[in-house]
Amino acid sequence: GSCRHRCCPGRNNACWVPGARRARCYCDSYCERTGDCCEDYRATCRRAAVGCVVGPWGPWSGCSSPCGVGSKARSRQVTVPPRHGGEPCPDLKQRRGCLGEHPTCGTAE
């Protein structure tokens, strides 16, 4: 079976061609996990794969708590979405702890 005219992203049970010994072989990117790709899948379909590209991290937000323990977050955008089974996108959000130290917070003495 040949994927020459058929490459599908993700998991697609309809994306197959007749293979050897009347078995089906698949041309979707999920076949790499299940091990049932057609022989030419990598050469034919992976060439068209485009991995995810993300932009730079944005600035951290302010602390969610003005006094004491809180969290801050930042995010980034996808600039090129993955196509044809390319590398998936990494995390787009990050969160970390922070300590609010606003001038109005009471100071323990």
Image (spheres, rainbow, N blue to C red):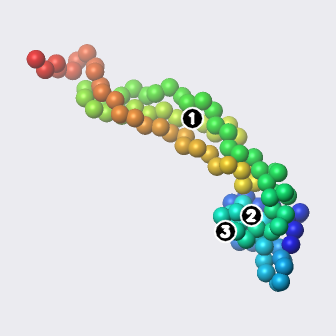
Which of the labelled discs sits on residue 34, or is there none? Answer: 3
Give the mark nearer the N terminus: 3 vs 1: 3
Q: Which residue, given by chain and number where applicable, does mark 1 sit on?
A: 76
Residue 43, given in percent of the width and then of the height, sits at 84, 57
Give the mark nearer the N terminus: 1 vs 2: 2
Type of the residue with mark 2: Asp
Disc 2 versus disc 3: nearer the observer: 3
Residue at 87% from the left image edge and 68% from the top image edge: 2
Residue at 82% from the left image edge and 51% from the top image edge: 47
Residue 19, given in percent of the width and then of the height, sits at 83, 76
What is the quadrant of the N terminus in the image? bottom right
Q: Which residue, given by chain and number where applicable, does mark 2 sit on?
A: 28
Type of the residue with mark 3: Thr
- Determine whether, in the image, residue 35 is placed left or right of residue 75: right
Quadrant assignment, res 17: bottom right
User: Around disc 3, counting alpha carbons within 10 Å, would you say few (fewer than 14), some (14 to 19), or many (20 or more)?
Assistant: few
